[in-house]
């Protein structure tokens, strides 16, 4: 996994698995130094960090599985 874009030496803390969509696996992380949220999106041939706005991070953390999937489908449209 590549270093976080915000704080290259900080260790990312895994917050929640967000599921698979558009051939990517999404996981929510939080920087241990600046506390910014990031989604790590990866698949076999590529991967990287995507910045998450605070309100989206809150939705990702608090949504139940039924609400999370449609939210992530919309959030991740750019990956398709």
Image: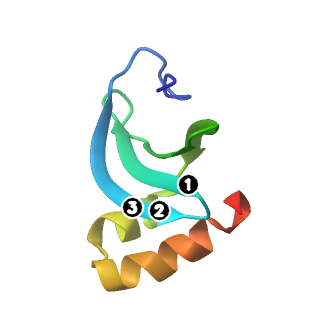
Q: Tell me the residue that label 2 is attached to.
A: 20
Residue 19 sits in which quadrant?
A: bottom left
Identify which residue, 35 or 77, lies in the foreground: 77
- Image height of 22 relative to 49, above or below: below
Q: Which mark is residue 66?
A: none
**Mark 2 in CB contact with mark 1 (< 8 angstroms):** yes
Other residues around mark 3 within 10 Å, as few (<14) / some (14–19) / many (≥20): some
Which structural element holds mark 2? strand
Separation (CA) of disc 2 from disc 1: 5 Å
Separation (CA) of disc 3 from disc 2: 7 Å
Q: Residue furthest bottom?
A: 66
- Image height of 66 relative to 55, above or below: below
Q: Tell me the residue that label 3 is attached to.
A: 18
Separation (CA) of disc 1 from disc 3: 10 Å
Q: Residue 24 location, x and y as percent?
A: 55, 54
Q: Residue furthest front?
A: 44
Residue 50 is left or right of residue 38, and the answer is right
Q: Which mark is residue 24?
A: 1
Q: Residue 43 location, x and y as percent?
A: 56, 45
Q: Residue at x 40, y 50 (%)?
A: 27
Which structural element holds mark 1? strand
Q: Residue at x 33, y 24 (%)?
A: 11
């Amino acid at each position: 996994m590549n270093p976080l874009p915000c704080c290259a030496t900080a260790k990312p803390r895994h917050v929640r698995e967000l599921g698979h969509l558009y051939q990517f696996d999404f996981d929510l992380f939080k920087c241990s130094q600046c506390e910014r949220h990031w989604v790590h999106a990866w698949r076999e041939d590529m991967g990287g960090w995507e910045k998450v706005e605070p309100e989206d991070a809150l939705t990702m953390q608090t949504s139940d599985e039924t609400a999370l999937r449609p939210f992530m489908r919309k959030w991740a449209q750019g990956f398709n």
